[in-house]
Image (cartoon, grey):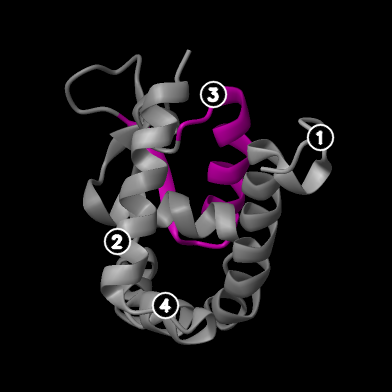
Amino acid sequence: MTGDLLRLDDQLCFALVTAARNVVAIYRPILEPLGLTHPQYLAMLALWEQSPRSLGDLATALAMDPATASPLVKRLETDGLIERRRSATDERRLDIALTPKGTVLRQRALDVPRQVMARLGMTVSDVVAIRDALGRFAGAAAL
């Protein structure tokens, strides 16, 4: 850090916001052929890990509130990738489940991480180190 504690380029928050914006911009053209935005891709990753799951569970997995996740889910449903249905164990709960189209999309998405690393000029170990450091930071910064 320089002598000026308020120098923009020395701010952690600025580096994080800039990095996030740049990463989303890298993902955009990679996800476009899949018909997904970056937030939709994250939701699909969570659903490929576990389906069905409740809206609340999905929102928690995505680190967002259910009110923010709901329009995302509606768009994925409109695109035919997921369906909302009553839970078999609790009819008050609405589960979000992959459709066959959503399940098949996973195969097409398998190359996304490799494409991202290629655009960044990074190896798997580079990405893992950054991800792990950011995970520790996010945990320390959690409210």
Secondary structure state at the residue bearing disc 3: loop
Q: Which residues are magenta?
A: 63-86
* Residue 28 position within the rendered picture, expressed as x and y whole percent measured from the top left: 64, 72
Residue 65 is labelled as 3
Secondary structure state at the residue bearing disc 2: helix
Is residue 98 in view from this perspective?
no
Residue 66's place in the image compared with 81, above or below, is above
* Residue 103 position within the rendered picture, expressed as x and y whole percent measured from the top left: 30, 66
Measure the C-alpha gap from mark 3 to mark 2: 27 Å
Q: Which residue is mark 1?
A: 4
Residue neighbourhood size for the residue with mark 4, other residues' Cα within 10 Å, grouped as few (<14), some (14–19), many (≥20): some
Q: Mark 4, mark 3: which one is toward the viewer? A: 4
Q: Which residue is mark 4?
A: 112
Q: Are marks 1 and 3 in contact (CB under 8 Å)?
A: no
Image point (62%, 31%), residue name = 68
Image point (52%, 77%), residue name = 34
Residue 128 is labelled as 2
Amino acid of disc 1: Asp
